[in-house]
Each structure stands twice: as C-alpha cells, then as structure tokens.
Image (cartoon, grey):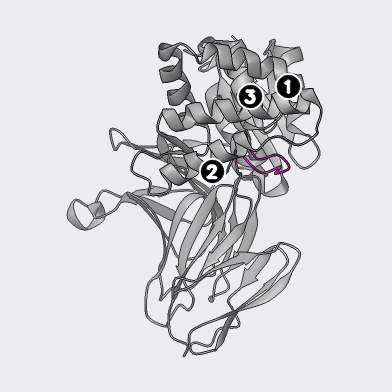
Amino acid sequence: MVPQEIENCIVRYLTRSGGVDDLNLLDEWLRNEENQTKFKAYVETHFAITLAMNDPNYDKVKDELLKEIRKERKPVSLYRTKEFLKYAAIALVFLGLGLLLKRDVFRPGDPNAIVPRDNAITLQLGNGEVKIISEDGSSQVVNEKGEVIGAQKGEQIDYTVASDHSETDFNTLTVPKGKRFGLVLSDGSKVHLNAGSSITYPTVFHRGKERRVVLVGEAYFEVSHDSLRRFVVNSQDLDVKVYGTKFNVSNYPEDEEYQVVLVDGSVSMSQVGDVDVSNKEMFLEPGFKGTLNKSDKEFDNQKVNTSLYTSWMQGDLVFRNETFENITRKLERHYNVVIVNNREDIAKERFNATIETEHETIEQVFNYFKKVYDVDYAIVENKIIINP
C-alpha cells in the first residue's frame, strides 16, 4: 500500500501542483524498486496512464524527454530549474516502468496535462460521427440524406421534428460525470439522463413496431402512451416493459443490482430472454422499487418514497440509511471527481444526508462529513483522499 504522505505527493506531481519538497520526497521514495512497483500499480489504477511497452512512440517520447532535460539552460530561477528537472526525472521513471502519460506531465504551462476529465456531452450519429453538444447552444441533428431529424436547444435534444417517413438511424447520447441532459424521443417520450450515463435510441419510432432504447447508467422516463407500441428500456440483462408511465431506471456498471422505481403507471421487469422461456416477469405498482441482483439474478420489490430516487433531476442527492461506499460513488458521478477511501472501516457504515449539488461544493459536502462523522480528508485538484 502507498503511504498517505507519498500518495499526496503522487497526486500533486501528476496534477502539477507539487513543490520541490514534494518532488524530492517522491524521487527519494522511487529509488526503491519495490516502491516503483507500488507506484506503477497506483497510477495505473487512478490516473490517465497507459502501458507503453508496445507503443510505437515509446522511444520517441523518451528521446524527446531527454532532449527537454538537456536543453533546459534558460536563465530562470534556480528554484524553477530544479523543479523542472525533478518533474522530468520522475517522468523518466514512468518510461522506465513501461508507462506512457497520455499528455506530457513535464511540459510547463499546460494546465490540463494530467488527469483529463472528459466533460463533453456527446451525440454519436448513425454513421459513427460524434458531435460535441454545447449546453447553452443550439443545433440541428441531420441524417445522411440531409433531413433534419432533431433539434438541440440548450440542455435538451428534441426528435419530434422527425418525419414518420424518415429512415431510422440509431443515435447515442452520452452525458459525462458532473452533468445532466434531456431528450425528447420521436414519439414525445421524455428522458432525463443522469450524470455518467448514455442512451442509444432510434431516431424515429415507426408505427406498429416496438419502441426500444438501451440505457447504461441512470435515467428518468416519461413515456407517451401508445397501446399499439410497447416501450422497452433495455439495460444489459434487464428489460423494463411499459405502455405509458413515469419511472426511474438505474444501472451503473459498478452497481450490484438493477433498480427500477415506478412513480406512475405500470411497468414490468424481466431478464433479457427469460420472459419468453419461463414467463419470469415481475410487475411493479406505483410507489414501489424493483431490483434485480446482478449476481444471483433474484428479483425483489419494496414500497419506497420515490422522491428519494428522483431528486437528482432537481440537482439534489438524498441519502437515507445509505452506505458510505454508495454515497461516494454518487458523489463522484455528480461532482466529476475521484474519491479514494483509505478508511475501510466506514465503507459499509450507513449515513443520512441531503445535498443540493447545484448550491453546495464538494468541499462543503466533505466539511459536513468531517464535522458530523469525523471523516478526515485532503483535496488535491479533482481528487479527494480520505485519510486513514
């Protein structure tokens, strides 16, 4: 395990916020081969670094780095020269371990050199083209024939402008951590996409055909009623079938279960393929939460306060009897940060909290945890380290 003091130095180094003392300490620690192994495992896990042993640019990167070190002869202060050389020397350790930074950490003046956080909302079109969506802009979505099939205005894309005679393409809308976005499908159904989520959907729902979308992450649906066209949300092994209703579906890759919370109407949950074979299908009533365990494939349902599961649409995170582990996962998604918990004793402890994410910073949130629950932490750039 990487010592706390060294971990802080690594984070400061990779975010270019470390001073000479930090660099000296890290450089000294890295002279031990066992520590280099720990260092490699840590940065591969927590930062945007890739193995470079087979990268064709590996030797070129190393040569350029050595050139940068050798040509550092400019008349700058001794402090700045030492700092630069120390950054570069540690960068050589990266290369010696077979690691390649996606950007050059040793180049001064680049505020985005390390830990790039992808903040762009993207729309992938049917032809594979990817468009960046500006939340305060407006644009049109056009198919390969030049037909306008959608219109984006602010934080929503609307496909109701598409003609029923338009060719069907599949678009994928991806919302990164720290953001939310809206979607109106061609039948008028509304989708509110939560942070760290994506949805794939047809640009046009044709008459007589099933309306099916694919979700990764979390979304709240307001489905337009159509008794002739069943609406299906697929999320990996789970199918949620509805005709007209309001409900929330949550399935992030790191979650242990699929969750469906029904606000209004009627939905059913089934494993993909199961309903046709064994007729195993669970129906939900309004005010109930249905779950499907990803390990044992067992269904369960219980009466809940639905507002606890839909409050994210108003920018609120409401936790009631929630494990600290689950809370930190949601905080990472909503604030677009990395949280490293070095206190295993509190991972499964349960907490209550209500956080207005649009008005409270992540610093304020952790100050609350520190005062109320004695959680000690350090914040370095976009990384929060919970101390043992």
| Residue 330, percent from left and from top | 59, 35
Separation of residues labelled 1 and 2 (CA atoms): 24 Å
Q: Quadrant of residue 17?
A: top right
Check disc 3 and give the amino acid type.
Lys
Check disc 2 and give the amino acid type.
Glu
**Front position among marks 1 and 2:** 2
Residue 64 image label? 2
Separation of residues labelled 1 and 3 (CA atoms): 10 Å
192 is higher (above) or lower (below) than 93: below
| Residue 22, percent from left and from top | 67, 17
| Left or right of 45 on screen, residue 184 | right
Separation of residues labelled 2 and 3 (CA atoms): 16 Å
Query: Which residue is labeled 1 in the image?
Result: 19
Q: Nearer the viewer, residue 138 or 258?
A: 138
Q: Label 3: how many residues lie within 10 Å, few (<14), some (14-19) or many (20+)?
A: many
Under circle 1, the secondary element is loop
Prevailing secondary structure class for the magenta stretch in the rendered image: loop
Q: Quick check: can you spot residue 345?
A: yes
Query: Which residue is labeled 3 in the image?
Result: 86
